[in-house]
Amino acid sequence: MAKRRPVVFVVFDGMKMLDVAGPAEVFAEANVVGADYAIGYVSPSGKPVATSTGVRFPVDGTRTQVRDADTVVVSGGDILVSEPVPADLIDTVRGLGPRARRLVSICTGSFTLAAAGMLSGRRATTHWRHAPLLSRRYPDIQVLPDALFVEDHGVFTSAGVSAGMDLALALVEQDHGADLAREVARNLVMFMQRPGGQSQFSAPLRIRPARTPTVRAVADLVSAEPALDHSVHSLAARVGVSARHLARLFADELNTTPAKYVEQVRLDHAKTLLDTGHGVAATARAAGFGSSETMRRTFVARLGISPSHYRDRFGTTAREHGNTTPAIASGLGEQFP
């Protein structure tokens, strides 16, 4: 019998349950259709851990009891961003990581890899909400906030929560090929490749308080009426400064240009309108894009999906035609050509 591939999950008190359960289910389903994974769980203490759902999660022991590890998966949890990463968790990852062929983090598990020094000089991602914090804490990491998952020389990091399943499926495909991975995706009702990146899930822009009244005034103008003419010259004239000075203020305070800021506000406004059921053409006008095509290009460039697809995905959990999800009703044809 061929040697099985050990997949070791590193868990801890406060871990997010789906960060482990989701990817583990992908590997387990892969075994059903012919893969060869041996799935195990370790905690720093070797004792069961408390999860985000309140369920106690049993483990197989500590890292010292792991004889072989092909893939090490580090789970995430809110505690990793609200407090320093526990020292015993860092030690566990440092002890297992170098022994594994692949080192993987799910969601905020990237903060543990970073604290252990395993992301230095690498590209990585994490939950979109915490990507700026990861960049600030560890400036030597190239954080890709829109990516669903990133691989850099054998170290894999995933975006928030359910994106861990996308990454696990990619690892299954890497190990066993597209046909087996496609069968896993069908059985779990997943996309082989989820359309778009993390940005489609992100909350509307929240501008931090500006140091200067000028930037604050411009932000208020754009947010109040995104459909008005907000060219840099128009905005500069309305607040009584030159276009060059306004551009310099935005670069210094917000690390962006006035034009990009306006586009982001319009995009956020359009997402809100689409969320509440407005049509694409009406949304384009109200948000200041001028035309549906201009808005479509912005959505595709920024989010990786069209406005109509965004509306279908985020507008409501209810569906017409008896609440049947279209992808399931159509036999998953769009997901699996």
Image: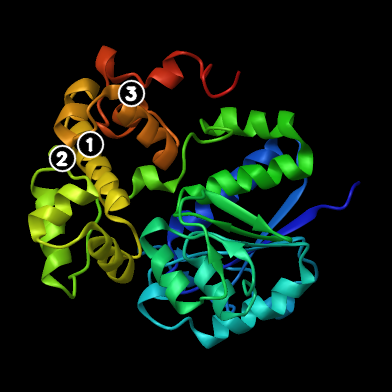
Residue at image point 63% right, 39% down: 29
- Residue type marked 2: Asp
Q: Where is 258 relative to 190, above or below?
A: below
Under circle 3, the secondary element is helix
Classify the position of the C terminus by image quarter: top right
* Residue 53 x, y percent position in the rendering: 36, 60
Q: Earlier in the sequence, mark 1 or mark 3?
A: 1
Q: Which residue is mark 1?
A: 270
For the rendered model, the colour scheme is rainbow
Q: Which residue is mark 2?
A: 229
Q: Where is 13 relative to 5, above or below?
A: below
Residue 333 visible somewhere in the drawing? yes
Under circle 2, the secondary element is loop
- In the picture, measured across the screen, residue 141 lies left or right of residue 285, that is right
Query: Looking at the image, do the residues carrying marks 1 and 3 touch, with CB atoms under 8 Å apart?
Result: no
Q: Select label 1 or label 3 by which is in front.
A: 3
Dot 1, how many residues are within 10 Å of its Cα: few (below 14), some (14-19), or many (20+)?
Answer: many
- Residue type marked 1: Ala
* Residue 294 x, y percent position in the rendering: 32, 28
Residue at image point 46% right, 70% down: 135
Q: Where is 326 relative to 6, above or below?
A: above
Towards the viewer: 19 or 253: 253
* Residue 277 x, y percent position in the rendering: 18, 27
Towards the viewer: 223 or 171: 223
- Residue type marked 3: Glu
Q: Which residue is mark 3?
A: 293
Separation of disc 2 and disc 1 at Cα? Answer: 16 Å
Residue at image point 27% right, 54% down: 258
